[in-house]
Amino acid sequence: MDNKKRIENVQPLRTNKEIQEMILAIRRGNGSYPKNKKIAERDILMFLVGINTGLRISDILKLKVKYVKEKDNFMIKEGKTKKKRVVNISMLRKEIDDYVKDKADHEYLFKSQRGDRPISTVQAYRILQQAGDYLGRDDIGTHTMRKTFGFHHYQRFKDVAILQEIFNHHAPSITMRYIGIRQDEINQTLDNFRLG
């Protein structure tokens, strides 16, 4: 599948099994050689932050160690909307503490191997795309993380208004379409629908 179609087809991971498979695929790397342990930890934490906060990849990659070290929440000004948002990371406390213990406060959380800068959004996309390819999926991209967060948040709380606010969407219909719920609901109504 070409990249344009892949980007248009990005889906959430709808089950915990799919999430666990994705974590294992990210840890594994691209298959030609084993992924360095520290790089694997970085990439998995990036994925976990994405699926547990709903942040856009561009905002995730701007994070520095000082924002998350020994904190359960931090404030971010989202790049796309320019709105401030409090981000809760308490569910990832152990993983973050283990990951940042030897890192300086000024370092980027998801630091590139090439200097004192974060990995690029293109590199983040490649990490997820390679894991998706390993799993035989052509619907994985950087938005998979945000959509996965939204899908599971909606499944648990059934409150589109809160999710709309978290995502800073203008309408509930945008949020529902974004996380794939609307199409799932449509499909369910048609599964046993038959006339004649």
Image: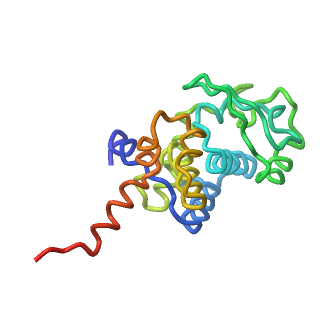
**105 relative to 9 in the view: left or right:** right
Q: Count up the numbered dots.
A: 0
Residue 147, above or below 168: below
Task: Report the residue at 78% width, 35% height from top.
Answer: 74
Residue 174, above or below 107: below
Location of residue 16 by image quarter: bottom right
Location of residue 22 by image quarter: bottom right
Q: How is the model colour-coded?
A: rainbow
Task: Report the residue at 60% width, 54% height from top.
Answer: 26
Which sits in the foreground, 4 or 30? 4
**178 relative to 19 in the view: left or right:** left
Location of residue 124 by image quarter: top right
Task: Report the residue at 47% width, 33% height from top.
Answer: 170
Task: Report the residue at 65% width, 56% height from top.
Answer: 27
- Quick one: quadrant of the C terminus? bottom left
**148 relative to 113 in the view: left or right:** left
Which sits in the foreground, 72 or 13? 72
Q: Position of residue 183 (x, y in %)?
A: 36, 56
